[in-house]
Image (cartoon, rainbow, N blue to C red):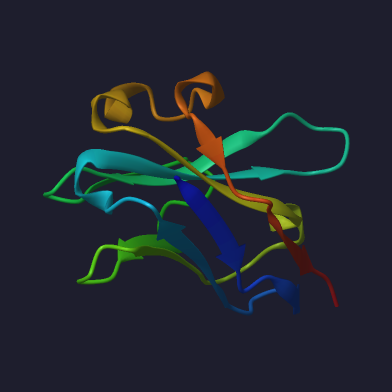
């Protein structure tokens, strides 16, 4: 059974860093797209980043380019989101989700993902 579990959220000051983890069970990541999304109160869920396929292609939302880095471990069971230079507007619940590798070009479409984690809260505040 496909399952995703996020961890690593917390409270951090502006300019600080956090690393989120998305642990996958029931499948390996080679032939899937793993997306990171976030949802702030009163806002729609938005795509942050994704990593896809055996070659590990990546993509980022414009709002996080140059600050966030997505990666996965060699065993290809965990995806990480390194978040640097955090801003108050990054505050949200962060979710990871899994979908087929072919959705890479439409990775920000939430309906393309079949399974979601429970989310982890990230709060950026002084």
x then y, percent, for residue 20: 54, 68
Q: Say which quadrant the N terminus sits in.
A: top left
x then y, percent, for residue 110: 54, 26
Q: Quadrant for residue 126, please give it.
A: bottom right
Residue 39 or residue 53, whichever sits in front: 53
At x 19% / y 51%, what residue is drawn?
56
**Residue at the front extreme?**
1
**Is residue 67 visible from the viewing direction of this image?**
no
At x 33% / y 63%, what residue is drawn?
77
Q: Is residue 73 left or right of residue 16?
A: left
Q: Is residue 13 left or right of residue 69?
A: right
Q: Is residue 108 left or right of residue 33?
A: right
Q: Quadrant for residue 102, please give it.
A: top left
x then y, percent, for residue 125: 83, 71
x then y, percent, for residue 115: 52, 37
At x 75% / y 57%, what residue is drawn?
91
Residue 44 or residue 75, whichever sits in front: 75
Q: Is residue 55 left or right of residue 108?
A: left
**Is residue 42 visible from the viewing direction of this image?**
yes
């Amino acid at each position: 059974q496909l399952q995703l579990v996020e961890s690593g959220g917390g409270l951090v000051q502006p300019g600080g860093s956090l690393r989120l983890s998305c642990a996958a069970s029931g499948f390996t990541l080679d032939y899937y797209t793993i997306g990171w999304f976030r949802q702030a109160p009163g806002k729609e869920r938005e795509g942050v980043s994704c990593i896809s396929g055996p070659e590990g292609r990546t993509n980022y939302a414009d709002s996080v380019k140059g600050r966030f880095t997505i990666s996965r471990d060699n065993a290809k069971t965990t995806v990480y989101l390194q978040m640097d230079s955090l801003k108050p507007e990054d505050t949200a619940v962060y979710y990871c989700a899994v979908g087929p590798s072919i959705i890479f070009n439409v990775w920000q479409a939430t309906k393309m993902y079949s399974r979601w984690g429970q989310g982890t809260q990230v709060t950026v505040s002084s």
